[in-house]
Amino acid sequence: MKIEMPVLPYADNALEPVISRETIGYHYGKHLQNYVNTLASLVKDTPWSAKSVEELVAEVPEGPLFNNAGQTLNHALYFTQFMPAKADNLPTGTLLELINRDFGSFDTFKEQFTQAALTLFGSGWAWLAQQQDGRLVIRKESNAGNPLRHHETPLLGIDVWEHAYYIDYFNRRADHVQAVWQIINWQVVADRLQG
């Protein structure tokens, strides 16, 4: 992706009550915009300016450039993977087959992923990622971490920084993580699969 704001594929109130319009305003409109603006200023007139955000995340050393590239990419993946809440929201097709293969069942995957999100100390992300051999894994990444750092493809990411949920859930991370399952657009996640 280029260093620019992703376009939301839904209205700013479409994810309510799981994620409120107010949270979208702050989290997408202010936090993500700040990461995008800062990243653009950090790469300006440098050799990094010709790189995609994914290349920056995979290649740059730890520090401000990585942090802003990571958060730009993480948030772009995060905000574009949602849709209005849907009952019995489950993956289908190849994605479900891979989840069943690598985790035993969707329920087991959901339990393990939720546990990863809830036990990550401090701020960061829980990820479903695809390894180069096609297998799916769950990753816990602190701060701006992304599976690209492990040469894996990020498929699904849940933001467990407090700014992602504090307006709607205060400090109740578990309530936020449980609610997010209702709004995942599994077709978007499936479209990120490689091979």
Image (cartoon, rainbow, N blue to C red):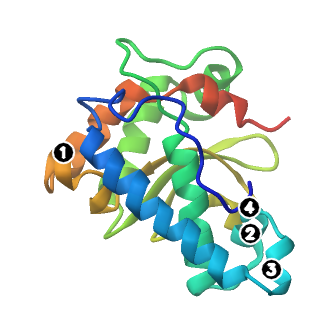
Q: Alpha carbon of mark 1 to alpha carbon of mark 2: how far?
A: 33 Å
Q: Which residue is mark 2?
A: 58
Packing grade of label 2 (10 A; few <14, some 14-19, many >=20) is: some
Q: Which residue is mark 4?
A: 54
Q: Nearer the viewer, mark 2 or mark 3?
A: 3
The amino acid at mark 3 is Trp
Q: Nearer the viewer, mark 2 or mark 4?
A: 4
The amino acid at mark 1 is Asp
Residue 189 vs 177, above or below: the answer is above
Q: Which residue is mark 3?
A: 48
Residue 39 vs 113, above or below: the answer is below
Marked residue nearer the N-terminal end (2 or 3):
3
Q: Say whether residue 31 is left or right of residue 93.
A: left
Q: Which of 3/97 is in front?
A: 3
Q: Alpha carbon of mark 3 to alpha carbon of mark 4: how far?
A: 12 Å
Q: Say whether residue 108 is left or right of residue 71.
A: left
Residue 11, x across and y down, in percent: 42, 30
Tell me the number on the disc at residue 168. 1
- Give the SS element for disc 3: helix
Residue drawn where x is 81% and y is 50% of the image: 132
Q: Which of 28/164 is in front?
A: 28
